[in-house]
Amino acid sequence: MSTSANGSDGIDVVVFDTTLRDGEQTPGVSFAVPDKVKVAKKLEEMGVPVIEAGFPINSEEEAEAVRQIAEAVEGSTICALARVVDADVQAALDCGVDMVHVFVPTSEVQIKHALHATPQKVVERTQSAIKRVKDAGVACMFSPMDATRTDPEFLVEICQIAEEAGADWINLPDTVGVGTPRSVQEMVERVRRHVQTPISIHCHNDFGLAVANTLAAVEAGARMVQVAMNGIGERAGNASLEQTVMALHCLYGKRTGLKTEKLYELSRLIERLTGIPTPPYQPVIGANAFSHESGIHAAGVLEKPSTFEPGVMTPEMVGHRRRIVIGKHAGTHAVQQALEEAGLHPTDEELREIVRRVKSLGGKGKRVTYADLFAIAESVMARVPKGQRALELEQIVVTTGNKTVPTASVVARVGSETRTAAQLGVGPVDAALKAVRAILGEHPRVEIVEFHLDAISGGSDAVATVLVTVEDETGRRTSAQAAHEDIVIASVEALVAAVNQLMRLRSAQAQGQPQQRPKLEQEVA
């Protein structure tokens, strides 16, 4: 048994990982043997002192997995589970493990209806099983199953018997998750008053208290915590490894010896092997654990992370990363930083317009991706400055239907004059573009020579990017693009931007100024 498993090597609390045993009892989860070995090796790399590899008597495949893990892992104590039954104990010993974890029901309801035995039989089987393990020269852990519903006097008695038989650890399971922090604390303290053997705690999450109960047990003197990665396990799962360990490190100042920077990587591996997605709001390892959208929060975190994060726990500590999310609640500072990191440097006016569009998009229930943000920014930044626009769109109204000819009405300023035009089209986009061209009249006469549409993010509410190339009667061409969740608006804005680029180009040439290539024309080529 590794020295870490019995609490030395500068470790305050020993981590006992049961992902491969109790975690695999998650409904619908079954690890292939090679995957079990892979997980065990990852746990070893992370520095987990004790790995419960499986329940060998369950099947030959299970026994083979435990055997392979025992052979492959050298830096952690490998444990196998067994009932207080000779065949179970022997199956575990045959796998070459360092520790055997024997368990027996001790609550009245389980002794009567699950074990179909008597308290005296429980005592006899406990003594026999522990002796068999110890005679084999292997460490032994004993669990009085359903400890939180076991008569307190009998719980103390069976723990004393286990200690006298030679158990190295006594594990107290909250098997059906009915403990509370106070009751678990009292249970651990009561057992500790009567036995010297170190105490382990195993909590289930039926009421969402598994981690809280585990920490309460540590406060009461438990020296080992039994946990599973991502909190997987029977019914509502076990106390999660990542939450328990990070709470011990950051809130209690306890040493576990784990390389916590490997937590996120292991979490993703378990997620992939089990097929159980991790909720984004899951503490420590969820996608949103270090994500910020609110303008006030994002601005504070960008200046000093501890303003709106725990401070004692950083994303780097668990192998995660901080994300500033752009959406309905985004602030100017966060949007600006995201754009600058992508090499986009909008003016103050452009930035305000980008933020307005982002908030508008998010306010419609759309998840704003970075692709959306960049498309919006490039669209806004491609526009001619406000004071230099020949055409300024003020309003657009489109009507369409299965028995109605698509119609678009557009109000825009051309120079100092407000103009209105309405046009029919084969579709709403065609009608809208015809209406814009009608507003321009014959001077200049503008033709659309290229129209390209891309939906740059998935879903029916995707942001559409439209690129339009226009040509006047002299053959001058300019191109511009726009992005919007409404394809009609994106199309009209791209056309207006291209027209303004064209008008600016015509004006510059008329005044004898050097021709400036429009910003987006190179993208067309």
Image: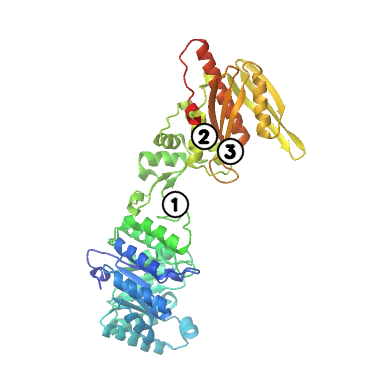
Could you tell which of marks 2 and 1 lies nearer the N-terminus? Answer: 1
Could you tell which of marks 3 and 2 lies nearer the N-terminus? Answer: 2
Location of mark 3 (residue): 485
Count of all numbered marks drawn on residues in the image: 3
Q: Secondary structure at mark 1?
A: loop
Spot occupied by residue 66 in the image (x, y as percentages of width and height): 35, 74
Q: Nearer the viewer, residue 157 or 334?
A: 334
Image quarter for residue 56? Answer: bottom left
Q: Which residue appears farthest toward the right when viewing the image?
A: 403
The answer to whether mark 3 and mark 1 are in CB contact below 8 A is no
Q: Amino acid at mark 3?
A: Glu
Looking at the image, which residue is at 33% across and 73% down? 68
Location of mark 1 (residue): 287
Alpha-carbon span between mark 3 and mark 1: 25 Å
Q: Is residue 357 above or below residue 57?
A: above
Q: Amino acid at mark 1?
A: Ala
The answer to whether mark 2 and mark 1 are in CB contact below 8 A is no
Dot 2 alpha-carbon crowd within 10 angstroms: few under 14, some 14 to 19, many 20 or more:
many
The answer to whether mark 3 and mark 2 are in CB contact below 8 A is no
Location of mark 2 (residue): 376
Looking at the image, which residue is at 36% across and 38% down? 303
Q: Amino acid at mark 2?
A: Ile
Q: Nearer the viewer, mark 2 or mark 1?
A: 2
